[in-house]
Image: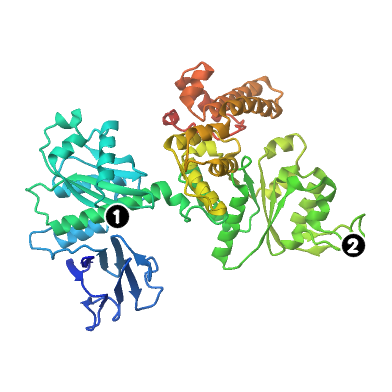
């Protein structure tokens, strides 16, 4: 039989704490005298907590748009903190807490810890685990502790103080966790010493102590664990407040894990358009610039290698524009590389019946379809010069003339994209310079996946979940070594190639765990490397724009040679310098000199702003 639940209420305005035991099937909380818990500052009817067999449900008695972040009318199973007005609530399912006594931490101290304002206490911050652990240890008066994340019983160290966590200790801790399923456990010093019997611990002067192990689920497959000593006798912290602090800490730590490892596959940062932003500085800047450009009516040119998500950026720009303007504009997409040479004019501008052989009906062009909306021209560099000239006239005059028909006015915003070097095409007389300037009122450059390899793992998880759902497959996961293999691969096909690899691995897998060997077989690494080298060399010489001046040629050769060396080593400048037969400092000096020259023809971005860029 389940025991009574509890709710802690922190009144931040008046600096008070209340603890209530929830004994009734439904507990009403509000400012009315009819409520079970009366709180001045809430609406009269307030809200109710309904106890169910599977958890608790929060039922709002006021407008649903009040605090929309709270999951109203949804089942809550675990410890759940939420805020209403100047009140902070913590619901403890099936935990009977005692009322606080006089010798506890002050209400203001507790409320400040529950509602952290310091950025370092933000669960999204990378330093959050270490900051949280230091805070907990200061409260309990201890000098050692650890925070862990377990997924499929494989431990990952989040933060440690005075612990030497090695393979033996993590193996013993894993076994202990698998043998003991309780969420809250007290581990005596002898057991603790067996788990963490390391030289660093045994040689230290840290006093012996029993330990607390608190576990809390954060995802279906994972849980976080707080591992800290019992409070020192010198610290006057009641069991109630300690319980509250640790439960809330475990909840915040689980949020950190979700933000760090899983937020990008949960729906918030993986847009409906299929665009994944990630957390790298380049992608953060790209997102910020995209948001600013979305508000405008500028023509935008999107640059990036094949498979990086150029169409996803275009769709994001449209969705953001619609959201900000409140006007729903459609986007019409055209893959210029797939247009047959003789039909390009008809497809783009339309035709009338009988205008040419096979024109059996009037046909609207893509410009007419996109009227008062957005036209996305993918692979714009594939259009021939004749069509480019007609496209330029449309962009200048806003007038479309169907083949064999009369001119008509259209209002279309153009977003174009290409994986080619447009400036090189202009030099080779394959692309009109005046069209380039008409299209390029603003430019967005999407970095290749190899330049943001930290995004590979969350993307892999997302694509795995996608293929499992789409094909009704049994549950499948990645082995750690498989993810490492994916992360170390260059992915010349970028996100599109990664998605294809993950889909094939999932569909062909029979064990339920995708291994590194399966990934290696699909990547065919050795063959890929040799083919990649040949492709790099072929591309290198095909794009070689020899200048007439010898000094310029020497500078250009150095730039391409260094760019090639950095590309081969995945931008590892120390390794690139070694391959070039020079020191890292010499490479840095050359880069700085070249960067100051008038030539700006690097095939990809090279950061020469700091010596710290050398890895």
Q: Residue at x 33, y 70 (%)?
A: 57
Expressed as whole percent of the image width and height from the top left, the position of residue 199 reads 19, 28
Expressed as whole percent of the image width and height from the top left, the position of residue 394 reads 77, 56
The answer to whether residue 46 is above or below residue 169 is below
Q: Is residue 173 visible?
A: yes
Pointer 2 residue: 353
**In the figure, is residue 212 to the left or right of 503?**
left
CA separation in Å, label 2 and label 1: 67 Å
Q: How is the image coloured?
A: rainbow
Quarter that holds the C terminus = top left
Question: 569 or 4: nearer the eye?
Answer: 4
Q: Is residue 596 visible?
A: no
Pointer 1 residue: 251
Question: 298 or 341: nearer the eye?
Answer: 341
**In the figure, is residue 12 to the left or right of 455?**
left
Tell me the crowding category of disc 2: few under 14, some 14 to 19, or many 20 or more residues within 10 angstroms, Cα based: some
């Amino acid at each position: 039989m389940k025991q009574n639940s509890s709710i802690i209420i922190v009144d931040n305005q008046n600096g008070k704490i209340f603890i209530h035991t929830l004994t009734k099937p439904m507990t009403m909380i509000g400012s009315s005298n009819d409520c079970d818990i009366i709180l001045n500052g809430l609406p009269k009817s307030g809200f109710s907590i309904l106890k169910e067999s599977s958890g608790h449900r929060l039922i709002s008695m006021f407008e649903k748009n009040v605090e929309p972040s709270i999951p109203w009318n949804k089942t809550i199973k675990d410890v759940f903190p939420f805020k209403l007005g100047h009140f902070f609530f913590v619901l403890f399912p099936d935990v009977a807490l005692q009322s606080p006594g006089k010798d506890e931490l002050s209400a203001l101290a507790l409320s400040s810890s529950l509602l952290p304002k310091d950025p370092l206490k933000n669960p999204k911050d990378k330093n959050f685990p270490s900051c949280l652990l230091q805070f907990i240890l200061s409260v309990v008066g201890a000098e050692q502790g650890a925070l862990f994340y377990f997924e499929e019983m494989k431990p990952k160290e989040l933060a440690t103080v005075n612990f030497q966590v090695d393979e033996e200790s993590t193996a013993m801790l894993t076994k202990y966790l698998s043998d003991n399923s309780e969420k809250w456990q007290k581990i005596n010093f002898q057991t603790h010493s067996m788990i963490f019997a390391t030289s660093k611990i045994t040689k230290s002067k840290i006093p012996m102590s029993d330990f607390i192990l608190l576990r809390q689920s954060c995802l279906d497959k994972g849980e976080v664990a707080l591992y800290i000593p019992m409070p020192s006798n010198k610290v006057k912290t009641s069991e109630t407040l300690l319980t509250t602090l640790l439960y809330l800490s475990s909840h915040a730590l689980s949020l950190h894990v979700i933000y760090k490892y899983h937020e990008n596959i949960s729906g918030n940062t993986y847009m409906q358009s299929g665009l994944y932003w990630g957390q790298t500085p380049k992608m953060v800047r790209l997102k910020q610039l995209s948001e600013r450009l979305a508000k405008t009516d500028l023509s935008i040119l999107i640059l990036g290698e094949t498979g990086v998500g150029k169409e996803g950026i275009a769709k994001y720009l449209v969705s953001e524009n619609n959201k900000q303007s409140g006007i729903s504009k459609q986007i019409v997409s055209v893959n210029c590389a797939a247009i047959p040479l003789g039909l390009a004019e008809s497809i783009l501008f339309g035709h009338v019946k009988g205008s040419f052989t096979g024109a059996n009906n009037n046909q609207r062009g893509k410009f007419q379809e996109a009227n008062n909306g957005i036209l996305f021209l993918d692979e714009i560099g594939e259009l021939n010069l004749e069509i480019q000239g007609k496209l330029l006239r449309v962009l200048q005059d806003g007038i479309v003339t169907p083949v064999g028909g009369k001119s008509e006015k259209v209002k279309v915003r153009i977003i174009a994209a290409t994986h080619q070097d447009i400036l090189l095409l202009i030099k080779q007389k394959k692309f009109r310079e005046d069209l380039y300037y008409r299209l390029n009122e603003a430019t967005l450059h999407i970095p290749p996946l190899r330049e943001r390899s930290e995004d590979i793992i969350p993307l892999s998880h997302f694509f795995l979940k996608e293929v499992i759902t789409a094909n009704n497959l049994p549950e499948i996961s990645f082995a750690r070594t498989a993810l490492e293999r994916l992360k170390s691969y260059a992915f010349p096909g970028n996100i599109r190639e990664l998605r294809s690899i993950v889909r094939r691995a999932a569909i062909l897998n029979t064990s339920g765990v995708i291994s590194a060997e399966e990934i290696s077989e699909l990547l065919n690494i050795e063959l890929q490397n040799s083919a990649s080298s040949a492709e790099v060399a072929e591309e290198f010489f095909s794009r070689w724009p020899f200048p007439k001046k010898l000094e310029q040629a020497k500078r250009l050769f150095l730039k391409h040679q260094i760019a090639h060396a950095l590309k081969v080593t995945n931008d590892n400048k120390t390794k690139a310098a070694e391959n070039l037969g020079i020191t890292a400092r010499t490479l840095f000096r050359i880069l700085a000199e070249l960067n100051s020259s008038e030539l700006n023809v690097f095939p990809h971005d090279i950061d020469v702003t700091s010596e710290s860029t050398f890895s």
